[in-house]
Amino acid sequence: MPTPVSSIDSVQGVLDALDEVIDRSLERGDRVGYFAAMYRQVTAKVAEGIADGFFDDGERMARLDVVFACRYLAALERYQAGRAATRSWELALQATSSARPIIVQHLLAGMNAHINLDLGIAAATIAPGDDLPGLRRDFDRINEVLAILIGGIEGQVSEVSPWIGLLTRIGGRHDDEIVKFSIEVARTEAWRFAVELAPLDPDDWAGAISACDARVARVGRRVLGPGLLGAGLVIIRARESNDVRRVIRVLTGVQLPTLASVEQRARLARHEPPGAG
């Protein structure tokens, strides 16, 4: 039996739960394992940062990581039990039953739901009210891990998607969400959403979350059904591996940035000089 999400209370618990999702996906040949495999790498990098004292407040970052990850794991748990999840996660998870989207579409649909909706909720949960501004530097750091990962994913999945390099070439001619999806924009929106929620009592969050979920689902639909770019995606998909288990294994080996490079990028995003404290 999968570990109940309600029992997860540590970063190691998150890693164990993600390992369970990946193992079940490998057994079943389930594309749910694509996002889980990539996200497991991100969580391991956060765990490394906490252990190394990389974050301003390691204990707070551990709590953020657990709340953030459990948003995804709870959505997956609900979906697999036949219960309603958020619209943006329903969209991403339903897509895993189809062989039509390319690997990067599956990953971005999950990232869209997780960053544009879940991250702001997690941040406001961990740092409500006047505590939120103090979270900003660590918030930027975790986003830089995601940004570097997405930025390099094209090269790293070429083993199972040899024509993925065509995406940016054909995408340059179209205004499609799959090409222009930006972690930087998503991060800005996630922080804006956290700022919206933080002053409110959590009992009053439902309306704001529902409205945000609707916006995020619209982005997800554009990621998965990208209009004029579709013909090019068919070409890329034709050369991608149909071996779901192989794809999952490749994604579990995606290389993540060093903590030093994450900090450098986070400083640049904040327009801080290299020696700033």
Image (tube, helix red, strand yellow):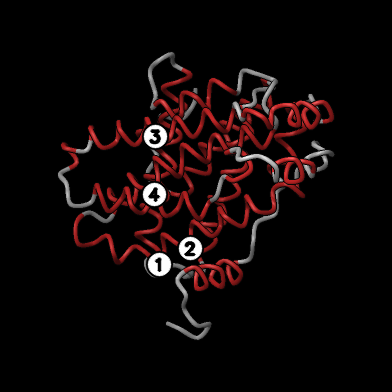
Marks 4,2: beta carbons within 8 A: no
Give me the C-alpha separation between circle 3 and circle 2: 25 Å
Image-based side of 234 in relation to 53, left or right: right
* Nearer to us: label 1 or label 4: 4
- Of badges 4 and 2, nearer the viewer stands 4
Callout in the foreground (3, 1) = 3
- Using the image as rendered, state which of residue 81 and residue 202 is in the foreground: 202
Name the mark nearer the viewer: 4 or 3: 3
Q: Residues within 10 Å of mark 1 (few under 14, many from 20)?
A: some
CA gap between label 4 and label 2 equals: 14 Å
Q: Residue at x 49, y 68 (%)?
A: 269
For the view shown, which residue lies furthest in the front direction?
A: 173
Residue bearing the label numbered 1: 137
* Residue in the foreground of this view, choosing between 144 and 73: 144
Residue that carries the numbered disc 2 in the rendered image: 141
Under mark 1, the amino acid is Arg
Which amino acid type is shown beneath numbered disc 4?
Ala
Mark 4 and mark 3: Cα distance apart in space:
12 Å
> SS at mark 2?
helix
> Is 50 above or below relative to 19?
below
Label placed on residue 190: 4
